[in-house]
Amino acid sequence: MNLSFKTGDELILFLVLVTLVIFAIVILFVVFGIFRALKQIDAERSGKIIEAFSFNTWWKGLTGAVPLEKEEVILLNHNYDGIRELDNHLPPWWKYLFYATIVFAVFYLLDYHVWYSSPSQEEEYLNEVAVAEKQIEEYQAKNANSIDEKTVKLLVSDAKVVAKGKEIFTGKCVACHGAAGEGGVGPNLTDEYWLHGGTISDVFKTIKNGVPEKGMIAWKATLKPNEMQDVSNYIMSIAGTNPPNAKAPQGDKIATDSSAVK
């Protein structure tokens, strides 16, 4: 059992829960004591004698077990090769537990399917996913400035990353590379040929440091590392799209490997 607490709120909630459990146990004993006292008063008025509480008596009443010397009371007239059958009933504790499950089921039905006061399993799952996504976004935002050409990740399957990259590309890269990456002043970004390497690390490095001698500025002063990662992944995602009016190939043909799309 892990009782580690990530926040002070979790510790407070745990202490409140423990306090409520202890309080419920105390209330239970108080109610039991009041019940015994009322029963004793009623017995005195009617001239009955109530025996002192005995655990053995209580346990026998809870199990409903019939003593061996009184088994003839519940003996049935069935005889199977000398084997006699007893008419044993379900023990009271089992029946009480069954009744409790019925009561619980009624409240469960009302709570989840009538009043909708508690979230369903699907809602709990979606809430947990939303919390996890928020935590991921916070983590990524916190570590955004630690991304470089050595740690950049290929995330072309992440629609959000590609969409963000496309937005940046449209705002800053279209003038030189075309709206579809077909090339213009700058090279075609959709074919198999690269001037400065075709892996995700190469593309990130080119965007980061630029190519001043060819007129491409270094975007590290304008874009954040995570934004450069996004636009790098967008560029990798448009590989092989063959847009119209594509510029002729430039540079070296680079085969697809595990770290690049083309």
Image (cartoon, grey):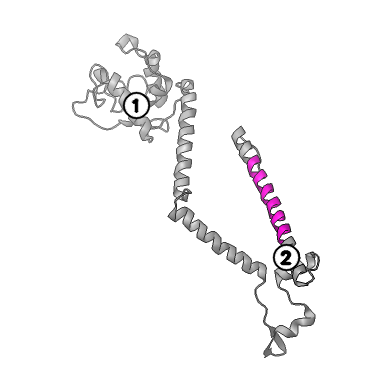
Q: Quadrant of residue 170?
A: top left
Q: Is residue 101 left or right of residue 46?
A: left
Q: Earlier in the sequence, mark 1 or mark 2?
A: 2
Q: Residue 47: image x %, image y %? A: 78, 72
Regarding mark 2 in the picture, which secondary structure is present there? helix
Residue found at x 45% / y 38%: 130
Q: Quadrant of residue 201?
A: top left
| The N terminus: image quadrant | top right
102 or 88: nearer the eye? 102
Tell me the number on the disc at residue 165: 1
Q: Is residue 28 left or right of residue 247?
A: right
Q: In this figure, which residue is indicated by the disc labeled 2?
A: 39
Q: Is residue 79 above or below residue 24?
A: below
Residue found at x 44% / y 51%: 116
Outermost residue, left side: 245
Q: Quadrant of residue 205?
A: top left
Q: Is residue 241 left or right of residue 126?
A: left
Q: Is residue 17 above or below residue 176?
A: below
Task: Report the span colored magenta.
Answer: 15-35
The 10 Å Cα crowd at callout 2, few under 14, some 14 to 19, many 20 or more, is few
